[in-house]
Amino acid sequence: MKKIIIFLFFVLLMASGIRAQQTQYMVFDFIKVENDQIFDYIEYKDLMEKVYRQALNDDKIKGWDFWALQSGADQSTFQYITITYYNDPVKMMNGLDESTLIDYTKIAYPHLNDAQVAKLFQNALAIKDTPMRLYMQEIVSTDDNFQMKPGVLASFDLMKAYEGKFQQYEEAETEVFRPIHQSRIEQGLMGHWSFLRTALPLGSEAKSTHLTLNMYKDYMQFFNAQAYEDLNQTAAQQKAVNEGLNSRDQKWVYLATLENVVR
């Protein structure tokens, strides 16, 4: 019996380790570019795709996305969103410093000398501003085989849990809303959903505490999802949904299109 208990303990420990390894950490950069530099920035994002692909090959990151904003609270504040994926919170917080990015630029552009690479990189950085950056940990996501490719749509829903209802809100997203989104995916009305908690910035003045990502393969799927109404919900399910909605404030919703992806 003792051997069985020890064996089960190690099985649970290994399972816990696997879950920890599978946890995704993400850095969201909300990027502003002046109107007269939009075309320069298009060149910049293509350059960064090559650079981040080198970082992926070197196992520094798990992926990188470039999203163009379609709608949101104030599009003059920023027009683009990038997401950099990590499998480790320390890697997320350390990020990729400038010297590392320059080294990867040299690999991506072997025909350029050091001075040309440095100038290319500095010119690229000069055309953008990052008014907001969020460090986030994925709490839960749907089970799906969604393919990330250019043209995919996503809504970035920034949430702020009400004071004293932080845990209640997280339980609602995990236990109430996740099954709803899973059902929509199985009906072909959505591609992927994930729920994230903000690691930084923290404190009562932070604009958001959580974020949900809702992904769709195209506009047709997106509009079908908006028109869908689940008439089969029981009174208890509807009550749970309403309680979940009342535990948070939906600060902003941004709709964006995926333009570049590194996986």
Image (cartoon, rainbow, N blue to C red):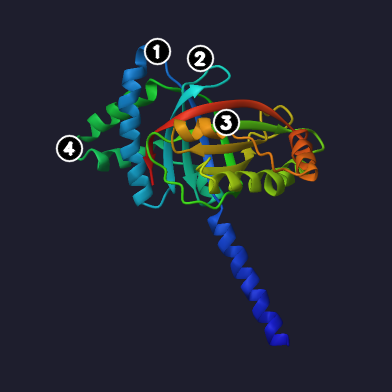
Q: Alpha-carbon distance for marks 4 and 3?
A: 49 Å
Residue 137 visible, this angle? no
**Neighbour class for label 3 at 10 Å: few (<14), some, many (≥20)?**
few
User: Label 3: which residue?
Assistant: 226
In the picture, measured across the screen, residue 23 lies left or right of residue 117, that is: right
First along the sequence among labels 4 and 1: 1
**Neighbour class for label 1 at 10 Å: few (<14), some, many (≥20)?**
few
User: Label 1: which residue?
Assistant: 35
First along the sequence among labels 4 and 2: 2
Asked if disc 3 and disc 1 are in contact, CB closer than 8 Å, the reply is: no
First along the sequence among labels 4 and 3: 4
User: Label 2: which residue?
Assistant: 76
Q: Alpha-carbon distance for marks 4 and 1?
A: 31 Å
Tell me the amino acid under the disc marked 2. Ser
Tell me the amino acid under the disc marked 4. His
In the picture, measured across the screen, residue 190 lies left or right of residue 247, that is: left
Q: Nearer the viewer, mark 4 or mark 2?
A: 2
Q: Alpha-carbon distance for marks 4 and 2?
A: 37 Å
In the picture, measured across the screen, residue 220 lies left or right of residue 45, that is: right
First along the sequence among labels 3 and 1: 1
**Neighbour class for label 4 at 10 Å: few (<14), some, many (≥20)?**
few
Considering the numbered disc 4 on the image, is that residue within a helix, a strand or a loop? loop
